Image (cartoon, coloured by chain):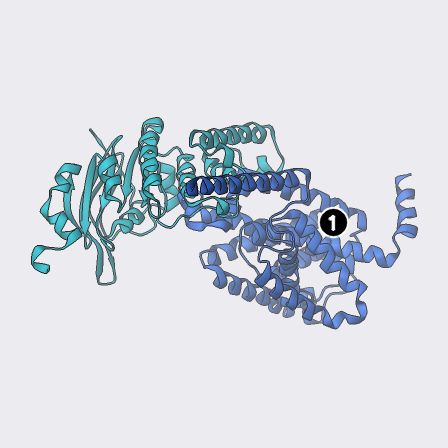
Chain colours: A blue, B cyan
Amino acid sequence: MLSQVSDFLGQTVFTVYIQQIIVMTGINLIAVLGLSILTGFTGLFSFGHGGFMAIGAYVAAIFVARLRLPFALAILAGALGAALVSLLIGRLTLKLKGDYFCIATMGFGEAVRIILNNVNYVGGARGWESLPLLTNIWLVLGLDVVFVVLTWNLINSRHGRNLVAVREEELASQMAGIDVFRYKMIALVASAALAGVAGALLANYLQFLRPTMFNMGKSTDLTIMVIFGGLGSISGTIAGTILLTGLPEFFRNFAQWRLVVYGLAVIVIMVGRPQGVMGGFELTPSGVRKSLASRKARLALEAEVRAAEREGKA
Amino acid sequence: MSAILEVKGLTKRFGGLAAVNQVSFRVAEGSISGLIGPNGAGKTTIFNLVTGVYKVTEGTIEFRGESIQDLEPYKVADKGITRTFQNIRLFKSLSARDNVLIACHMSAKYGLFESIFRLPRYWKEEKVLRDKAESLLEIMGLQDRMDVTANNLPYGLQRRLEITRALALDPKLLLLDEPAAGMNPDETVQLMRLIGEVRDQFKLSVLVIEHHMDLIMGVCEHIHVLNFGCTLADGSPEDIANDPKVVEAYLGAENDR
């Protein structure tokens, strides 16, 4: 019954083309969610997460195509592989301040791509074709829901609040007893693991892999989706991913202008609205309640200050 | 009274410059002590050394009889020392409530796994944290301002919030770096009262850096005076006020004129 329903939906409601866009958006969303933890909530900018996605993709591909192991295990291995590498990278780079960390991640992403170019076991620069098709729309959407919920739970816990504290004010976080290095590491490993999952799904959806798929352009795409959607907002991350993965598809003919629009969007947002389209706002009942309460409290405060001033003058 | 903080022969050199040179003092348990001196005397450097932001060049720092020099800042906070900053450092884009809630984190022990899967311990301890943050904000008179973004608070309340956040860690020693900076006389008097109340209510010791002499003389039981990184005087407020060397450092010697 269920499969009939899904076949029906698959054939009528979602044409193959629309399905493809949804799957690609869903896969991107997993990687962007991870990056949202790192960039949006912890304040560390990365331009190398394509590298972690590549590790997840190639590890998963080896698991299913070479070792003939089940897909679930391959996804897990992709996530673990990326997480382990991020642990090492984090040890080396997380003590770097701001822009220097950013440059280090950029170097890491490029290094992964160039190493993959030279490993013939996985096809080298020519690429690796005829991988099995194992990813489908339901798996991707199901994982999207799971990861959105888990990310939400992480952010709304004392650990998530500590990440935000690190973003807001590092020195004050230290004085509040927060091990800044450890929390940066948690954010980096979580983001790498999610990028690994996304890579694993991608490899077994496109059925081919090529190192250039994970170049710096891919890494920047992911980061831009986070910034565009709004730093420090999970609903913003979802909105940013849908808009920036989906829109170029609807403007296929202008695809070469996409990067120009990207660049402009980033500049405009960085200058005019550094907190992103959604800012820290969450489009959920609790998020709306919170921002209403904040507005009300601010207005009450302003009214009192004005009243006090008037009294002082009188 | 026994000392909660004991600093001996503390020295910090930046290249050839000794910002702090052979300074020794103690903070008696339960006291409010003052650290004063002209600009550049090394007061904030001492705070940075005690809290582990800077590494000590020479000397020892003991907190409750235990050596704490060269500990990471977050570990110093863990031991029970916390501070406020000369230029307020709040989590600016977060609400007052979240500022305090973050600092309460050490009162909960649930782990990462328990948070992402929302296990029972998460719910139980999260409630404890929220109650604690709210009751602290209430004690400090910020109950009507809990939802205001820290950045939107007036200056005096920002100072107050920073102290509230520091108290959320249940410190044994509170370091206040120029808490009255930029305050008018009214606010300063309120702050003096607040420091005394906080000490009594939370049973802690306070070390305060300040330039407002009326605040220092009004609230401190013991004062340590620095000048050019060295100790100039040490004693009760009366001794300090009458010490010719202190008067000279602040106002200049007679033959200077």
Spot occupied by residue A103 in the image (x, y as percentages of width and height): 52, 65
SS at mark 1 in the image: helix
Where is the N terminus of chain B found, in terms of image quarters?
A: top left
Quick check: B66 above or below A196? above
Q: Nearer the viewer, residue A143 or B18?
A: B18
Spot occupied by residue B96 in the image (x, y as percentages of width and height): 50, 40
Residue A266 seen anywhere in this rendered image of the structure: yes
Spot occupied by residue A270 in the image (x, y as percentages of width and height): 58, 62
Q: How many labels does the image show?
A: 1
Quarter-of-image position of residue B116: top right
Residue furthest to the front: A314
Quick check: B102 above or below B16? above
Q: Nearer the viewer, residue B195 or A172?
A: B195
Q: Nearer the viewer, residue A204 or B57?
A: B57
Q: Residue at x 72, y 64 (%)?
A: A209
Q: Residue at x 57, y 52 (%)?
A: A38
Residue furthest to the left: B255
Residue A196 seen anywhere in this rendered image of the structure: no
Where is the C terminus of chain B found, in terms of image quarters?
A: bottom left
Q: In this view, does B142 lie to the left or right of A77?
A: left
Graded by Cα atoms within 10 Å as few (under 14), some (14 to 19) or many (20 or more), the crowding at tag 1 reads many
Q: Which amino acid does label 1 sit on?
A: Phe
Q: Which residue is drawn at 26% across and 49% down?
A: B43
Q: Which of B100 and A154 is in front in this view?
A: B100
Spot occupied by residue B45 in the image (x, y as percentages of width and height): 28, 51
Q: Mark 1 lies on which chain?
A: A
Q: Which residue is drawn at 74% across and 72% down?
A: A256
User: Residue under circle 1?
Assistant: A71
Quarter-of-image position of residue B113: top right
Quarter-of-image position of residue A61: bottom right
Quick check: A302 above or below A271? above
